Amino acid sequence: MPSSKTRIAIIGGGVAGLVVARHTAAKLDTYSLTLFEQTDQVGGTWIYTDETDIDKHGLPIHSSMYKNLRTNLPREVMQIPDFPMKHNEGPSFVHHSVIREYLWDYAKHFNLYPHIKLNTVVKHVEPDTLPNGQTIWMITYEDLESKIETTKTFDAVVVCNGHYTVGHVPHIPGIESFPGGIIHSHQYRVPEVYARKKVCILGASWSGMDIAMEVSEYAEKVYLSHNLPESVDLKMLENVEQRPGIQSIQGNIFIFRDGSTAEVDNFIYCTGYKFTYPFMSTKVEMRTDDNHVEPTYKHLIHMDYPNLFIMGLPGIVIPFPLFHLQAQYILSILEGRIKLPSTEQMREEYEMEKKALLDLGIPLRHIAKLKERQWAYYDEIAAAANIPSFPPVIRKIYDHVDQMRELDLTAYKNYQYRIIDDENFALCYCKPC
Ligand code: FAD
């Protein structure tokens, strides 16, 4: 007898996959779920490893976590709304191992492990159409221990494979002639290896700035090369010099766009990541030009297949709480409580929104970087799913952190935030870690 339950496949056991599993597992009368995770642990990005190349099964290392990383959001904002983080003394910007423990506690608390297949990689996702026109999904996965490959059918797929593994590496004329060490931030682990070296870091986004700060404690000199219109305020870091983008490289001499040069021993690309879905059938159109994934509606739903969902597309957001809303929104769609417009209407609406943003001068690759637009997005999907959005205090803390970061990038992580009520928070300064 075929099951009358909706069969949900979740690809990836990082926080996005766990949150979708948590909400699905709360309704086991309606759903059967399988979460596929290729590594031997859940947590995704938050599983630190010294390895940078391949894992014990020969798969590329997934996590880009580095040894000393502390979160860039305070735990009071990062936490999943229905599973508060333990409040400990010390700064709110915690070491990555605290988040790993938190995610493991989450999986245990919501009894998710019975639904999780560890050491299991999804290799192929293929749509099929039933005579009644409904799309079902054939998922082929390999048990990496036994090497057995299996194909099973599901009614809905939630893609949670993460977006920070495959490095974007722009070509720089002359890079082949550079004799020094080259890595992408995906492979960066510890700063000590740069002791007394002259290091060039390309890119001044999160990882570029963070890595520049920690490497500068050991390196003789750090050149932070970027195309931002203004210098980043890196107070007190006397051995960090900012330069424009790199024009070319000749041996160990880097030539920057302003004509200045520098001798370099080691080079770190902090140039972001590429979004990839290597398991997806070519039947399913998934354009990822400029890391902008199309055709998706509300940065989540595949417009041609409204039972295929892609988590984690919005950038400059509060990812864990966002997943909490998106997961419930997905279930509301599957349960028919949210009625999506037709594919044509979704496309029309999406194209109008996209055009409006492009007309404002926002490039395609930044359309899903919600930043100021994130709060309206949360409210919209929460209202559609008939669940509470976030209380005002979350935005207040987020905005406060933004201001503190602007004021002093090297010190903002020394503060502790405490939520008093839905509107108010308290702040105190902790001794630097
Ligand atoms: P991931 O955590 O990447 O998980 C994806 C999972 O899918 C992995 O476990 C992977 O093994 C699995 N997988 C992939 N392909 C397959 C397959 N084919 N079959 C089976 N399993 C598969 N966010 C914050 O909120 N605060 C921070 O301070 C912060 N710092 C960050 C620092 C770094 C260095 C990076 C890279 C990201 C940081 N982020 C931070 C963003 C972070 O990525 C998100 O918060 C969140 O962890 C993303 O979760 P995810 O589940 O989408 O992806």
Image (spheres, rainbow, N blue to C red):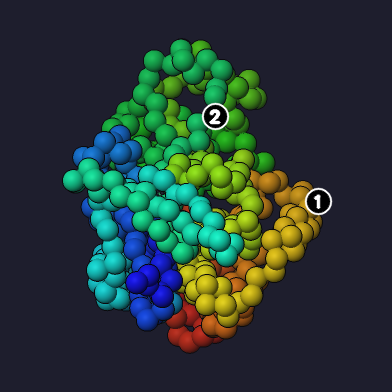
Compared with 198, 160 (above or below) is below
**x 35%, y 45%: residue:** 62
Q: Position of residue 256 (x, y in %)?
A: 59, 24
**Quick check: which quadrant has ligand 1?**
bottom left
Q: Work out whether residue 359 or residue 328 is closer to the camera in this orientation and state it.
A: 328
Q: Which mark is residue 359?
A: 1
Q: Position of residue 349 (x, y in %)?
A: 75, 62
Q: Would residue 385 be visible to someone looking at this image?
A: yes
Mark 2 Cα shell of 10 Å, populated few (<14), some (14-19), many (≥20): few
Q: Secondary structure at mark 2?
A: loop
- Report if the beta carbon of the residue with label 1 is closer than 8 angstroms to ligand 1: no
Q: Secondary structure at mark 1?
A: helix
Is residue 328 rendered to the left or right of residue 358? left
Q: Position of residue 155 (x, y in %)?
A: 46, 64
Q: Which mark is residue 170?
A: 2
Q: Work out whether residue 83 or residue 223 is closer to the camera in this orientation and state it.
A: 83
Amino acid type indicated by mark 2: Pro
**x 44%, y 16%: residue:** 178
Amino acid type indicated by mark 1: Asp
Q: Quadrant of residue 402?
A: bottom right
**x 56%, y 61%: residue:** 131
- Asked if the residues shown at circle 1 and circle 2 are in contact, with their CB atoms under 8 angstroms apart, the answer is no
Give whichever of discs 1 and 2 has the lower sequence position.
2
Compared with 423, 356 (above or below) is above
Is residue 256 rendered to the left or right of residue 99? right
